[in-house]
Image (cartoon, rainbow, N blue to C red):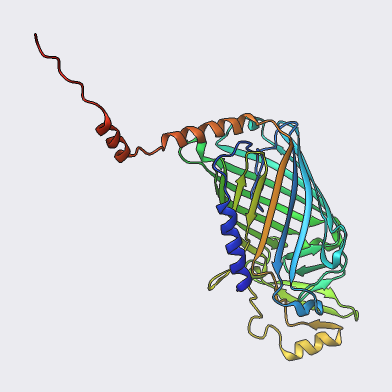
Amino acid sequence: MPGLKILLILFSLIIGLCPVEGYKLMSGEGLWFCENSDTHGKGNLWLNGFGRGFYWDNPTVEEGGFPLKIFPCVGADYGLFPFLDVGLSSEVLSYGFQVPGNLRARLKATLPNNAKLRLFGGALSVAYTYNFLKEYASFGYRNDHVGFYAEGLMHTGGMLETRFIGDAELITWKSFLPLKGYLNVGYRMPLDRSWSFYDQLLVGAGIEYKSLSTDFFLEYQLEILNGFSGFTSPQTVRFVDGNNNLKVFPYYFRENPMYLTPGVRIRYENGLTLMVAVPITKIGPMTLTKQVGFPLDPISTAEKNDLRAQGILWTDGYSPFYADWKIVGKISYPLFYKMTNAETIRKFLLMRNKRGRQVIDIDEMMKGKKNETVPQEKENP
C-alpha cells in the first residue's frame, strides 16, 4: 500500500534523527498498549501530546468521508508518591469533529520496591473513561451507542478498565542485557451493565531494548469480546435494529482486534521524548484479525423463516473492519523532573557498558608507535 510505504519512510527518518546522548530518563514510561509497572516518581510532572491515525480503506461507509483519520490527544502524568501516580488525558478531536472525544483518568499503584531497579515489577492500574461521542462510522454492527468500528469496540458513556501489570528488567540480572519484558492482563467494561455483553478481556505482551537515547520495542495486543466464551465456538450477538427487529449473528474469536506493533522511542538532552509506533493487523499473507464467516449453513431456511415470523432476523454475520495498520505517536516533556533512583542506576549501567564496548583502532595505535623516537644507547667512555 502506498500509504504504508510513506509511513515506513517517515519512521526511518525519525530513527535517523536519534541524538548521540540522552539524559532525562523517564520512569514509568510504557509501550503503546502495555503499561509499565514503575511510577513516574514523586513530584515529577510530564506533559504529553499523543494521537493515532489510520487510512480507512472503505470510505463509502461514511458516505463520502475523507479516508485518512487523525485523532490528537493531550494529557499529563504526575507522581503523587514513590509508589503511586495519576494520569489525565483527553481526546481533543474525534469522529465528526466531536470535541472532546473522551476524557480519561488513570491511577496506578506499584510495589514498595519501586525505587530500586528491580528484576521483576508488579502494579495495578485503574482507569475511568467517559466517551462523549454518540455518532461514529461503524461497519457491520452498531447497537444504540455501542458498536465495532475501525479500531475495535466503542462505548458511549462511562467505562472502567483495570490492569494487572508485570515486567522484567533483564539489565539487573546481566548488565549487558538492556532488555525489558512486559505483560499486561486487564478487563474493560461499560458502567451501564445492561451492556455487560460488551465487556472485554485485555491481553498485551512486549519486549523492549532500552538505551540512553533510543529504545526499540515490539508488542502484541489482543482485545477479547466477552472473555474467552467464543474461543471454541462463536458467540451469539443479539440486538434490535431501527425497525424494532431482533437481529442475531455469530461472532468468532478471530474477529477480535489483534495488533502487532513495532515502535521506537527517542530521547533528547532537553528532556523531550518522542515515540512512534505502527500497530498492524496484516503481515504479508498472515492476518491476525480476520472475518471467519459462517459455518456451513448454521440454520436451515425453514428455521430462518420461523425466526422471521417471531420478528428475529438471522443476519449474514459480523464482518470485522479494523484498520490494517495505524500510526501512533507520543511527545512528552518534563515540566517538573528529578531522576528516580531506579533510572539513576540504569543510566550508570548503560554508560558503564557503553565505555566497556569501546573499540581499539589497531592501525592508529601502530601508526603512533612508528612516530615514536627510539632512544639511543649511550657509548661507554
Q: Residue at x 58, y 57 (%)?
A: 13
**Relative to residue 348, is residue 239 drawn left or right?**
right
> Relative to residue 277, is residue 43 depicted above or below?
above
| On screen, residue 97 above or below 124 | below
| Picture mark count | 0
Give the percent coordinates (x, y) of residue 256. Answer: 67, 66
Q: What's the residue at 59%, 59% (across, down)?
A: 11
Residue located 30% across and 40% down the image: 363
Q: Is residue 320 left or right of residue 344?
A: right
In the image, residue 349 lies at what x, y percent? 51, 33
Image quarter in which the N terminus is found: bottom right
Q: Nearer the viewer, residue 67 or 82?
A: 67
Q: Nearer the viewer, residue 220 or 350?
A: 350
Q: Is residue 300 visible?
A: yes
Residue 289: x percent and y percent?
A: 63, 69
Single out the residue that lies furthest toward the top: 381
Please tell me which residue lies in front, 154 or 323: 323
The quadrant holding residue 111 is top right
* Residue 191 location, quadrant: bottom right
Residue 261 visible somewhere in the drawing: no
Can you give x and y, in whole percent of width and height, for residue 82 in the image?
A: 71, 31
